[in-house]
Image (cartoon, helix red, strand yellow):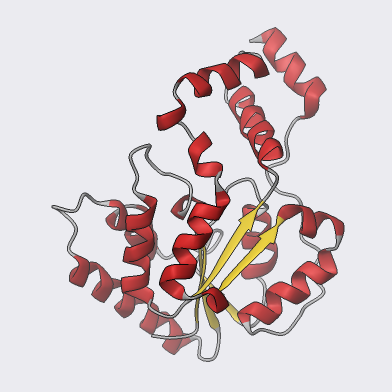
Amino acid sequence: MDNIALHIGFPKTGTTSLQRGLFYVHPDILSVCPPIESKKIRKLIEVDIYKDGLLYDDEAVAEEFRREIELLQKQNPGKVFMLSDENLCFYRELNQDRMLVAKRLFDIFGPARILITIRRQDRLICSLYQQTIQGGSYMSFSKFLDYFMARYATSFLPLLKYSLIIKTYEQLFGKESIKVLPLEFLERRPHEYFSELSGFLGVKTEDFSIPHENLGVGFIGLFLKRCFY
């Protein structure tokens, strides 16, 4: 099993846009990200890899991953296998051990290429707040911050120390196998962003126009939602 690329997040960094506008349509990439689904691989990456150590069978999980991926690669020879899931470096559950997940990914995939997308932390927090309001909450931004600051250790805030997750993956996979790309780079210089990303993945550079996905409602929309809930 070779020619593997993993996009591990972070969330709110253009993940859905990359999945739908690049990984899904690029002729040199075999994507199992949404909108394409491999039910077995999604179960492995969304359930099995997070299991408690007492329940996790490393050999069985690795073998099932390899069997499914090799089958897809035989059907799509020469393509880069791309698996994208933003929760791999953020959290699916608050007690998720991100270092343990990273080690399990290394044990399964070995010398894979790791794409990490980031954005300014203050903008990411604002985006998460917008998502909270869209989901039906009515709290102000200051109360939103106060709520998570009071629960700092079990909140998403410690997860925004990008350097910790980057260093972990560099130690496991090697610095040359890691690419970190900011969302701001995509917004300001998209052609250079795609060129750098394509070079890292080893695919030809395509002139893609990636649509914005999961757009926020803006500050006026947030105000109206809070007023009428």
Judge from the rendering whether residue 108 lies leftward or rightward of residue 171; answer left or right. left
Residue at image location 56% in from the left, 78% down from the top: 176
Position in image of residue 7 (x %, y %)? 54, 64
Q: Residue furthest left?
A: 54
**Foreground residue among 83 and 162:** 162
Q: Is 209 displayed left or right of 46 in the figure? A: right
| The quarter of the displayed image where residue 24 is located | bottom right
Percent from the top left, x then y, of residue 35?
A: 56, 59
Q: The N terminus lies in which quarter of the figure?
A: bottom left
Can residue 46 be seen from the camera position used here? yes
Q: Nearer the viewer, residue 161 or 36?
A: 161
The image quadrant of residue 200 is: bottom right
Front-most of residues 158 and 114: 158
Q: Give x and y (percent) for residue 148.
A: 51, 23
The residue shown at (63%, 28%) is 129
Q: In the figure, residue 123 lies in which quadrant?
A: top right
> Where's residue 101, x and y in %?
35, 57
Q: How many marks?
A: 0
Residue at left 60%, top 14%? Answer: 143
Q: Could one spot residue 8 in this view of the protein? A: no
User: In the picture provided, is 81 more to the left or to the right than 70?
Assistant: right
Residue sitting at 54 percent across and 76 percent down?
177
For residue 17, above or below residue 158: below
- Relative to 200, say whether 142 is above or below: above
- Between 158 and 95, the one lying in front of the other is 158
- The image shows residue 81, relative to residue 224, as above or below, that is below
Which of the image's four quarters has the C terminus? top right
